[in-house]
Image: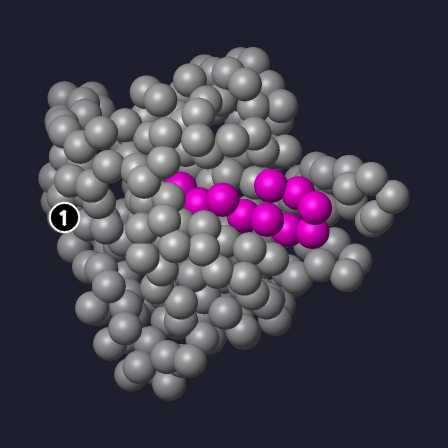
Amino acid sequence: MGVRYLGGPTALLEVGSLRLLTDPTFDPPGDYPVGNRSLRKTIGAVVSRQDAGQVDAVLLSHDQHPDNLDHQGRDYLLSAPLVLSTAAAQQRLGGTVRALDPWQHHDLARGGSAPLRVTAVPARHGPPGCEPMTGPVTGFMLTGDGLPSVYVSGDNAALEHASAVADRFGPVDVAILFAGAARTALLDGACLTLTSAEAAQAAAVLGARHVVPLHFEGWAHFSQGRDTLDAAFATAGLRDRLHVLELGQSMTI
């Protein structure tokens, strides 16, 4: 499988013959309103939505926050053949968005090969009880005969949900973890995504052979990043599994 890190939560995944895009964000740096607040973007995407190219599907963890789906990301969805996301995103966005409830799946055809199965997995965007304020989110699990198993956490802050994924699918080959320890005034500074230490714990629980962090830089509300990820995984004895990519960097796993 191939991974190219495009910034924030956005990455191009190549699994078998399929191209998938996570949470498309292509807008320039600036302030982006959400409710009566704003989120500040500090680093722009390394490619435009046009240069990102066509994909077979978009894996959209949620649509209600501009750091996971921005203006140009919404434009990108208009040409996407399939967007897998939450029921709320399907209701708001329409188009090619297909809702998947937790543990439901959709099979992506691969010509004469076995399909890639995309299973929606539980996620919680903050501490227990946060759902009325942060809204629904989803993660994804990618599986298929002869393909690596890939967990995409989305904006999940709940280690118990990572454990539930491990119970059904573990050990996983690749864990793509949104790990910036996002904090805003919405929940008095509580972490809305995994901390670096929690990302290392999730990697251990999942038995992940490789870990690629996303969504740990590029926005002012991230409280942790590259340095803390490296230190946390080193402390957990998992440094050899961690791949912290530079903007625009690609790697093959």
* Label 1 Cα neighbours within 10 Å, binned few <14 / some 14-19 / many ≥20: few
Residue 168: image quadrant is bottom right
Position of the N terminus by quadrant: bottom right
Residue 108 makes an appearance in the image = yes
**Quarter of the figure that contains the C terminus:** bottom right
Spot occupied by residue 141 in the image (x, y as percentages of width and height)? 60, 51
Relative to 75, does residue 64 appear above or below in the rendering? below
188 over 205 or under it: above or below: above
Residue 170, relative to residue 17: is it above or below? below
Q: Position of residue 93 (x, y in %)?
A: 47, 16
Quadrant in the rendering for residue 26 = top left
Q: Which residues are magenta?
A: 10-19
Outermost residue, right side:
112
Residue at point 37%, 79% (across, down): 239
Residue to which mark 1 is pinned: 189
Within the image, what quadrant is residue 231 found in? bottom left
The percent position of residue 207, horizontal first and vertical second, equals 54, 74
Q: Is residue 12 left or right of residue 230?
A: right
Q: Is residue 30 above or below residue 234?
A: above
- Specify the amino acid type for callout 1: Gly
Q: Is residue 195 magenta?
A: no
Q: Helix, strand or loop at disc 1?
A: loop
**Residue 129 makes an appearance in the image:** no
Determine the residue positioned at 27% across, 27% down. 27
Left or right: residue 144 compared with residue 67: right
227 sits left or right of 51 in the view: left
In terms of depth relative to the viewer, which is nearer, 12 or 155?
12
> Residue at horizontal 31%, vertical 44%?
8
Q: Is residue 13 magenta?
A: yes
- Residue 237 vs residue 48, the one in the foreground: 48
List x then y, in percent, for residue 95: 56, 14
